[in-house]
Image (cartoon, coloured by chain):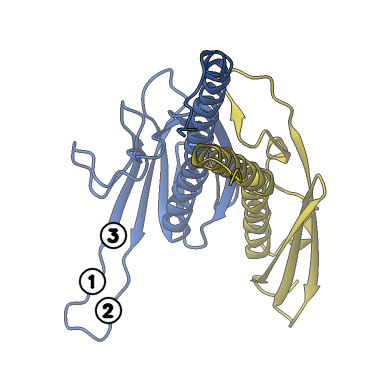
Chain colours: A blue, B yellow
Amino acid sequence: MNNQRGFVLIEFVIALPLIIMLLYGLVQTTMTVFSTAKSQAADYVLEVEAQDVLTRITNEARTAFYVKREITYSGQEIDTLVIKYHSIKDENSSDVVDIAERRVYKVSKSHKLNAKRTNDSSFLNPITGGNFFGDTIITFLKYKKLDERVLHIELEMESLATNKRIRLSTAVFMPACEEMEGF
Amino acid sequence: MNQRGFMLLSTVFLTLILSFTAIMALQAMTRVQNGDQSLKLHAINLANEQLAMVESLAAQNNLSAVKNFNGDNADLKSYGLYNVNADKTPVEFQVTTHIDAVTENLREVEVTVTWNDAEIKFKKLVRIADGE
């Protein structure tokens, strides 16, 4: 006797809407999961890049004998910083290097921060932006003199992936600094 | 025999639902645990700001001018990571500075930054110009 049965119509009628609702829920959940993961990665990139910019600037300003603040573009809340410092003497080599290096931290029109080693017109060594997990831009970068040989840096960056912003401030003491210009 | 177990489809759906729930819970947990990170970053930079000021005052032989916080008072507030279009509430930071003598010319500076229920401490040796 053949006792095998398939679904009856009424079972399909009840099961189909339930399956559709379940699949809809799963799709929504999947989208939320991916969106949250993307947002978390972008937040992380924003924090890391903001701290990296501050660290790069403070590390080089620390050894400066001259710093100068310039207005980058009129009306923008972004300054340019020129740092001059002596490179380290290599006493063990016959090629003793004792020249003044020059670093210019300038934000290009695409709001990526560049650190030009020399004063030519091209942008070199970009240190922000272009991260696949969440591109960032600099929206605010100001320098001021806080005290004798103390440079205050205020930075704000925005993630293009999430429109979130972070604002960090710090200061660096420059023991060898002889001149602070433009403050 | 009329014994039946779960259908394969039921097991697949159940596994899917449970795994998605687990992923969401893990993500939420990461977010909660790491939510304070931007404020911690702010606190670290705030401590460095005060240490820079103390170094400068030490180089000027003027450590008596050291206060709890000698930096820019506007930096004592932070919004952490905030959305451009959302309302934001600032978090207040408190900074305290303590100086101990190590030798005639060396001082140990301890900077403590507190906010909400969190706290970080930084210690650094600074050299004063010619003794104070």
In this orientation, does residue B127 appear? no
Q: Secondary structure at mark 2?
A: loop
Can you give x and y, in whole percent of width and height, for residue A125 in the image? Answer: 27, 47
Asked if labels 1 and 3 share a chain, the reply is yes
Q: Is residue A88 above or below residue A135?
A: below
Residue flagged by tag 1: what amino acid is it? Answer: Val
Q: Secondary structure at mark 3?
A: strand
Residue beneath the point at 76% across and 71% down? B132
Can you give x and y, in whole percent of width and height, for residue A118 in the image? Answer: 23, 48
Specify the label residue A100 is tagged with: 3
Residue flagged by tag 3: what amino acid is it? Answer: Ala
Can you give x and y, in whole percent of width and height, for residue A11 in the image? Answer: 56, 19
Residue A44 relative to residue B119: left or right: left
Which sits earlier in the primary sequence, circle 3 or circle 2?
A: 2
Residue to which mark 1 is pinned = A97
Q: Quadrant of residue A82?
A: top left
Q: CA distance from mark 1 to mark 2?
A: 6 Å
Q: Quadrant of residue A116?
A: top left
Residue beneath the point at 63% across and 43% down? B31
